[in-house]
Image (cartoon, rainbow, N blue to C red):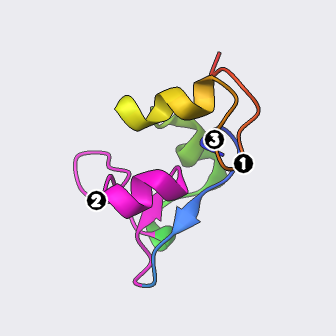
Amino acid sequence: MCRNTISVGWRGEVYDCDFNQRLGMQLTNGKPLSLWDITPESFEALPIRVADHCFGCTAGAGSSCGGALV
């Protein structure tokens, strides 16, 4: 999910994964980003937010993931 889909909170907060949304790991570029703050090009330039919960997806066992991030 984090490579090609965004998750958006009800107030417009942008996350790169539904798991990150649940954990409050909002995308930032020095400040929290909202849907109206990004373009497809700017989203592609942001680093993917990762933590221990990402191991499930990189192993191919995430909710909508198909394998490694690289």
Q: Quadrant of residue 22?
A: bottom left
Of badges 2 and 1, nearer the viewer stands 1
Secondary structure category for the residue under label 2: loop
Spatial distance from mark 3 to mark 1, Cα to Cα?
6 Å
Amino acid at the residue labelled 2? Pro
User: Where's residue 38, x and y in %?
Assistant: 51, 59
Q: Is residue 26 above or below residue 4?
A: below
- Nearest the viewer among 12 and 2 is 2
Residue, disc 1: 64
Is label 3 in contact with label 1 (beta carbons under 8 Å)? yes
User: Where's residue 27, x and y in %?
Assistant: 38, 51
| Residue at 45%, 84% in the rendered image | 10
Residue, disc 3: 62
Q: Is residue 25 above or below residue 66?
A: below
Range covered by the magenta-colored residues: 11-34
Secondary structure category for the residue under label 1: loop
| Residue at 66%, 20% in the rendered image | 68
Spatial distance from mark 3 to mark 2, Cα to Cα?
25 Å
Please state, as top left, top right, bottom left or bottom right, where the C terminus lies in the image. top right
Furthest residue toward bottom: 10
Amino acid at the residue labelled 1? Ser
Amino acid at the residue labelled 3? Gly
Q: Is residue 39 left or right of residue 28?
A: right
| Residue at 56%, 63% in the rendered image | 7
| Residue at 66%, 46% in the rendered image | 1
The tag earlier along the polypeptide, 3 or 2, is: 2
User: Where's residue 25, x and y in %?
Assistant: 32, 52
Which numbered dot is residue 32? 2
- Nearest the viewer among 35 and 23 is 23
